[in-house]
Amino acid sequence: MLQVVAAALRLPYAAVRGDGVGWTDSGTPPTRIESISLRYRGAPVGELLVGVRAGQSALTRADRSVLELLAGPLAVAVHATALSADLQRSRERIVGAREEERRRLRRDLHDGLGPVLTGMAFQAEAARNLVRTDPDRAEELLATLRNEAAEAIDGVRRLAYALHPPSLAELGLAGALRRQVGQLEAGSPVVTLEVPDALPALPAAVEVAAYRIAVEALTNAVRHAGAEHVGVRLHVDGALEIAVDDDGPGGGCWQPGVGLTSMRERAAELGGSLLAAPDDGGGHVRARLPLLEPTVPGAPG
């Protein structure tokens, strides 16, 4: 398009810049360049840079009229390109997070549970060999083996919790959140939980993401908001909506730490969205998760 614009108006140079980055250009930049703002729904998304013809000090009024007409479609194209780039970066972060989770689980199994089970096998064999010749020593080994087995079971439970909180399978989303609220220490802010009388059957990924987001937002509010009251609400209206609000001092802005980034990535992974910010009335987290799991490009059918 830029080549056509430059050729039609006999301009020596035309370029589009978005977010301070040159996206595409045509021609050689002359000494004098003028810019036309590209705006999408009132918000600036970039600029159209145009070279002034040799012998002229500025674009003519006719040139500007034509270029301002073209600015609308160009702004839409720049906005769409930016959204596509953001989506690609989001997908890359999600894929990276998944791979990091796999590496963590593999490391925990290999470096943690693996050696424990190997040691238990050797101790069991040693105890078997000592049963007749040294029963006291065999009993000591069996006692140690029992303790290590208990530790191994705890390790398996921790891994299982990382994949799918047991309370979800036992109680469902509403029940698991009620248990979480009930476990808050005395002296914490007053927490209210509002859930529909009957939640629809939720996809497992949606249920886990909703639980993790709600618990993370609740934990942050209880620990850091300085609030007297925290409200957690679930609502279903074509999607599962999670809202966590506190009446803390608010103001300022939240720096995107690990917890906030994790919540956003969990929502994005399901094709949902998450907004989190404070205002003068306290802190607010809003997540919306589609009930239908999206098809991820490149995923097996």
Image (tube, helix red, strand yellow):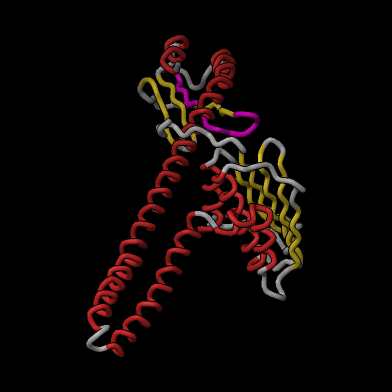
As drawn, the residue found furthest toward the front would be 132
222 vs 87: above or below: below
- Residue shown at 42% from the left, 42% from the top: 92
Of the pair 58 and 78, the residue shown nearer to us: 78
Can the viewer see residue 199?
yes
Q: Which residues are magenta?
A: 40-55
Q: Position of residue 218 (x, y in %)?
A: 65, 60
Q: Which of the 4 quarters of the picture holds residue 67?
A: top right
Q: Which of the 4 quarters of the picture holds residue 68?
A: top right
Q: Quadrant of the C terminus?
A: top left
Q: Position of residue 168 (x, y in %)?
A: 59, 55
- Residue shown at 54% from the left, 55% from the top: 256
196 vs 104: above or below: above
77 left or right of 230 in image: left
- Residue 52 lies in magenta, yes or no? yes
Secondary structure mostly taken by the magenta-highlighted segment of the chain: strand
221 vs 83: above or below: below
Q: Quadrant of the N terminus?
A: top left
Q: Which of the 4 quarters of the picture holds residue 32?
A: top left
Q: Position of residue 209 (x, y in %)?
A: 57, 49
224 left or right of 87 in image: right
- Residue 6 lies in magenta, yes or no? no
Of the pair 280 and 287, the residue shown nearer to us: 287
- Residue shown at 68% from the left, 54% from the top: 174
